[in-house]
Image (spheres, rainbow, N blue to C red):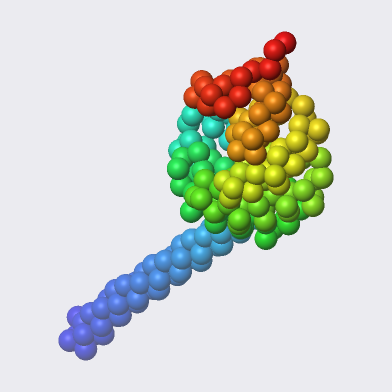
Amino acid sequence: MPLKIKILWVLCIVLVFIGFIYFSFLGKIDEARQKADLKTKQQSRVQGKLKARKIENEGRTFKTDPIKEIKELNALGKYDDAVKYAEGVATLNPKQPKIYTWWGISLVKAGKNKEAIEKFVKSSKLDSDYSKTYLYWGLTLAMDGKSKEAIEKYKKVIELDSENSNAYAYWGAALEKLNEHVEAVEKLERALEIHPKNSNVFIILVDALFNLKRYDEAWEAVTKAREAKVMISESTLKKLKKFHAKPAG
């Protein structure tokens, strides 16, 4: 075979080999591109589903009433669990004011008053007409010794719910703390008009009447407390007896 033909033959083989390598490389690039496109589409679909799920969950209705669950956890003394549960529900339902209120209540029970007030503020911004928010907000302020601020919250409760016995009871308790005994008795008696056996009233009422030296009325309050199965402390009874014996009959 002539040398020139041999050279051409070798060159052809080399070109064929190079072509094979080149087209194989192009094929791998194309395959890689297809895989990348597929991955991008998959990610897009996943993100779309997550976004749709998030939108759906924002108004999610639970099979079990979440507020009932929070109440039950608190009733069992599992305050930290109640806080965590409320936080999880609020994450899924960020625009539900009652969840923030009960989150706040759970925080109070867990001894975290400052954080609780933040939740009450959030709840009131979402719904300024939910009276329970202001009731527990006031109680939390009262626990921190802020009686005047607490009274403003109780007033708001009465604006929203004029027959709320507890709002009057707590308002009376705050007034008694401020040594405004006459006004305290008025609010406490109003609470009993609405709910004659409100257990939150009697102990404070007895003290307020004692401080006003209205001893006979204080003894009447003790009798009503016993009828409502509310225990008046022995120290209070001894103090009352010391200044005024229990009326006969």
What is the quadrant of residue 226 in the picture?
A: top right
Q: Residue furthest bottom?
A: 4
Q: Looking at this rendering, what residue extends furthest in the top direction?
A: 249
Q: Position of residue 124 (x, y in %)?
A: 67, 56
Q: Nearer the viewer, residue 57 or 113?
A: 113
Image check: 24 left or right of 126? Answer: left
Vertical order, 95 against 165 (above or below): below
> In the picture, which quadrant includes the C terminus?
top right
Is 239 situated above or below 7? above
Q: Residue at x 61, y 52 (%)?
A: 150
Residue 77 position (above or below residue 120): above
Is 232 in front, or is 157? 232
In depth, the one of 78 and 85 nearer the eye is 78
Residue 119 horizontal side relative to residue 168, left or right: left
Q: Return the x and y of residue 147 as percentages of the image width and height.
A: 58, 52
Q: Residue at x 70, y 44 (%)?
A: 182
Q: Is residue 213 left or right of residue 190?
A: left
Q: Is residue 249 above or below residue 113?
A: above
Q: Percent from the top left, x then y, of residue 227?
A: 70, 16
Q: Quadrant of residue 209?
A: top right
Q: Residue at x 64, y 35 (%)?
A: 213
Q: If the image is split into quadrants, where does the N terminus sit?
A: bottom left
Total residue callouts? 0
Which residue shows up at 61% across the image and 55% down it? Answer: 148
| Residue 87 visible at all | no
Camera-nearest residue between 43 and 28: 43
Q: Position of residue 137 (x, y in %)?
A: 61, 50
Q: Is residue 126 visible?
A: yes
